[in-house]
Image (tube, grey):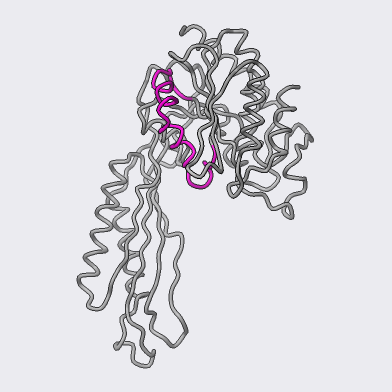
Amino acid sequence: MEVKRILSDLVNIDTHTDKDTFDAVNWVQQYLLSYGVESKLVYNPAKTRASIYANIGKVDKAIILNGHLDTVPANSDNWQYNPFSLTEKNGLYIGRGVCDMKGSIAAALSLVPYFIKQQANIGFVLTHDEEKTGRGCIEVLNDRDVKASLDKAAGVVVMEATDRKLIARHKNVGSVSLTMNGKAAHSSNPVLGVDSIFYLVQAANIFYSTLDEYKEVDSSFEVPTSTGIISKVQGGQAVNVVADSAMLKSSVRFMTDKARDVFLNVYCNRIKQLQREIPGLTVEIKRSAGLPALNMISKDFTNSLPFPHAKNASYYTEAGRFCEYGIPAVIFGPGNIAQAHADDEFIFVKELESFISDLMCLSKISSKQR
């Protein structure tokens, strides 16, 4: 089967986030060229990585299939199978990236001759570095020629794992890092110091109370409220020394970018107020608006796709970035998100075969939009 051959070739190429994607990108480029489909590479500034854009048929009203070629790393010691050699066993394909998301990319590429025969308006945006910084998609969207083509498209289908159910919205991500700088002192007389950990605990309480005060509630999401965590805390020197420095990292996920930004403003202002109230305490605040939410900016595009819908997602995908740039996008792909990033990552063979049928359906929709 063509999809198995393509998937095998892509899995054989280790594209984890600390490596470049050129071997995979070159493979895709040559594969497309074998069918007469030209493509454009979009490089990172250092030209050490690249994404690829191609279009079959007309640019106007095209349906764009998006996926990322990079994967998370794989520790072979934790795998029963070789993560960089496709294994088929008990109705499963096993290998790094088969679910996230080389499987869906292989399914889409296997249909290139079908798309050509059907005179479909189908495009591809395959990015690098989605798993680490997300810069690949931004570089594609900042390329003047590619962006001009995408602006004419009907919309983008981001082929992340959704159990082949359509998702029209997902949450964003924002983060704040704090470094509390106080003053060291001997623990026998702590009042001579400024205890950074004591005030870090206060900052943590402010984080959770502010989140509870400003959280959104929306039952259409799988996790129906805004969420946030303190993901890292570090500080102190020794058991008998007042900590002169302590660090806290936190992140939040909101349904809308506006609500996230309101929370970040209020939280950071409350931390600044804490600093003003404590003599000798200084606070370094590093804030990142992070990653944008996906909102349904075109009901026409979403409603044109005849697939069952799932609850809105709490994880982030490149669909949010396309939405940020004014391009309609949805998430729809084979496999389950729980299978992604796992040891012995797998996808059901039949699930991938069914997804091929879904893509053939998209091809017919795009053909009618000529």
Which of the 4 image quadrants contains residue 4?
top right
Q: Which residue lies furthest to the front in this view?
A: 46
Q: How many labels does the image show?
A: 0
Q: Where is residue 158 in the image (x, y as percent from the top left)?
A: 51, 29
- Please tell me which residue lies in front, 346 or 205: 346
* Residue drawn at point x = 49 percent, y = 6 percent: 368
Q: In the rendered image of this protein, does residue 147 appear above or below residue 340?
A: above
Residue 140 inside the magenta-drawn segment? yes
Q: Where is residue 281 in the image (x, y as percent from the top left)?
A: 27, 75
On the rendered image, what quadrant is the N terminus found in? top right
Left/right placement of residue 31 relative to residue 272 reads right
- Please tell me which residue lies in front, 355 or 246: 246
* Residue drawn at point x = 60 percent, y = 38 percent: 100
* Residue drawn at point x = 43 percent, y = 78 percent: 236
Left/right placement of residue 63 relative to residue 294 reads right
Left/right placement of residue 4 relative to residue 108 reads right
Residue bounds of the magenta highlight: 128-156
Q: Where is residue 52 in the image (x, y as percent from the top left)?
A: 55, 30
Q: In the rendered image of this protein, does residue 218 appear above or below residue 108?
A: below
